[in-house]
Image (spheres, rainbow, N blue to C red):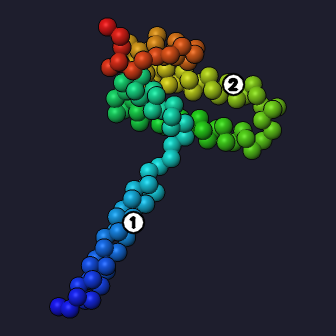
Amino acid sequence: MRSERLWVLVFALTTFFAGLAAGVLLSSRRDREERPLGAYEQRMVEAFNLDEEGVRNLRWILRDYQEKIDDLKESNIAALDGELVKIGRSHRELIRNKVVPEHHRQQFDLWVGGLPVLPTGSRPQ
């Protein structure tokens, strides 16, 4: 094999594998679903050590909440401020009663009141 052929082959293989790696990276980013209120969800999962069912319920509630907020955005939101507060409170109660484990509900009440809650594993001794 001549030297030029070797270099062309090496270049072709390098280009192929670089393209393959880029495709894998881009497809994994595209496959990730951008969830509404994702940061809030992540904080709740960490703070209250939610199980798989709790995470699934939380995602459903947050998605429903986001859809209702989006619906309100389409109308005059200033006139519907009271409705927005009512929807927020009802969804917060759903999260408290259906997602947060019973032994964490007092912590959740403090958390929604603005006080910090440490994740279960990082509590001071």
Image quadrant where residue 75 sits: top right
Give the left or right position of residue 95, taking residue 101 as reference. right
Give the left or right position of residue 78, taking residue 22 as reference. right
Q: Residue furthest left?
A: 1
Whichever of callouts 2 and 1 sits on the residue coming sooner in the sequence is 1
Q: Is residue 63 visible?
A: no
Q: Quadrant of the N terminus?
A: bottom left
Q: Nearer the viewer, residue 47 or 8?
A: 8
Q: Residue at x 45, y 26 (%)?
A: 44
Q: Residue at x 69, y 42 (%)?
A: 71
Residue 58 placed where, x, y %? Answer: 46, 32
Q: Is label 1 in a helix, a strand or a loop?
A: helix
Amino acid type, residue under disc 1 in the picture: Gly
Residue 70 placed where, x, y %? Answer: 67, 42
Q: Is residue 114 visible?
A: yes
Q: Residue furthest front?
A: 3
Q: Residue furthest top?
A: 125
Q: Which residue is mark 1?
A: 23
Q: Does residue 86 lie above or below 60 as drawn?
A: above
Q: Quadrant of the C terminus?
A: top left
Image quadrant where residue 22 sits: bottom left
Amino acid type, residue under disc 2 in the picture: Val
Residue 37 placed where, x, y %? Answer: 55, 36
Q: Residue at x 67, y 24 (%)?
A: 86
Q: Nearer the viewer, residue 92 or 115?
A: 115
Q: Which residue is mark 2?
A: 85
